[in-house]
Amino acid sequence: MKTIDRTMGPMEWALLLSLSMLWGGSFFFVGVAVEDLGPLTIVALRVGLAAVALNAWILLRGQHMPLDPGLWAAFFGMGLLNNMIPFSLIAWGQGHIASGLASILNATTPFFTLIVAHVLTRDEPLTPGRLLGVAIGFAGVVYMLGSEVHAGTASHSWAQLAVLAGALSYAFAGVFGRRFRRLGCSPLVAASGQVTASALVLMPLALGVERFWQAPWPGPATWSAVVGLALFSTALAYLIYFRLLASAGATNLLLVTFLIPASAILLGIVVLGERLEWRHLAGMGLIGLGLVSIDGRPWKWLRSVAYACWKARREGARR
């Protein structure tokens, strides 16, 4: 049975860091746009503009989208799990909580992914070390949610639960998306297909439900945020996403969610004037510790360093 290589090389790490910055910026862009637009409208514009950009790029390369019904069924499935559900839930949640907190809660995606991948696949098992990481990470989430409930901020609690539900949807998407490699679908076609399918569903839904044209017309800052969200945090980000998904696996890829809060928190504090409380940072610390436990490589590195120090001291004592 062939397994996915869990050891990422320099190129994969570079792509992972780039993806974290692009997706970290998405929380900032949504934080700006949600002041003037409804969540469904934001998400519909996000996937709609991204679909236009990606399909245009395919045409410029002299290629065309496949017409296979089975592949398009996969596009709609991926669009539902990776765009429609999580984008809408997170955008709604950001209407009630800070973008930095939303990004921290989104960092639980790898924990959900481990459980989903363990249940639905045969090559990404849930080992005891990873189970410990899941437990530590969810302890951080429970601590943050428990603080909100104790403080009596029910709307904040529901918003946080919505972001967590979005993270769970991302986890299913990470496992579901592996089939595109077996289908011989390139990262460009996979990215274009899923956002196109999402746009076909969300555009009429947003127009019918929120009717954004009846509200005051948004200003330049809002439209700039929407364009940045669509072109950089969606179109470009998904090209990188599917490239990494094919080479690094669902679990490795979704470690990116722990890197996202750094840029999201910084942008939220500097530009949007947001403020995170100590309990949020403490929860993030527990989530980070859980991710370190899941990955395992930092512990192996520390053990190797400790062994090298012990060996050097032993050699010195013999002399």
Image: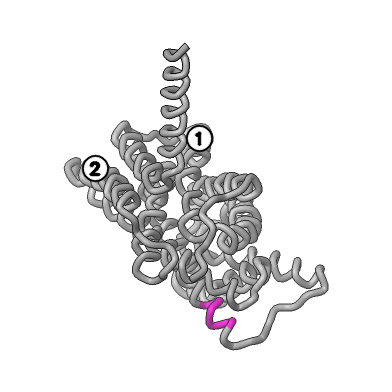
Query: Horizontal placement of 228 versus 29: left or right?
Result: right
Q: Are marks 1 and 2 in contact (CB under 8 Å)?
A: no
Residue sitting at x 38%, y 59%: 114
Residue 262 location, x and y as percent?
49, 38
Residue sitting at x 59%, y 88%: 69
User: Of helix, strand and loop, which mostly describes the magenta segment?
Assistant: helix
Residue designated by label 1:
266
Residue sitting at x 62%, y 67%: 191
Q: Nearer the viewer, residue 150 or 192?
A: 192
At label 2, which amino acid type do we have?
Tyr
What residue range appears in magenta?
71-76
At label 1, which amino acid type do we have?
Leu
Residue designated by label 2:
143
Disc 1 residue crowd, few under 14, some 14–19, many 20+, Cα 10 Å? some
Q: Is residue 149 above or below residue 250?
A: above
Q: Is residue 299 above or below residue 308?
A: below
Is residue 245 something that shows in the picture?
yes
C-alpha separation, residue under disc 1 versus residue under disc 2: 23 Å
Q: Which mark is residue 290?
A: none
The local secondary structure at tag 2 comes to helix
Query: Horizontal placement of 140 versus 90: left or right?
Result: left
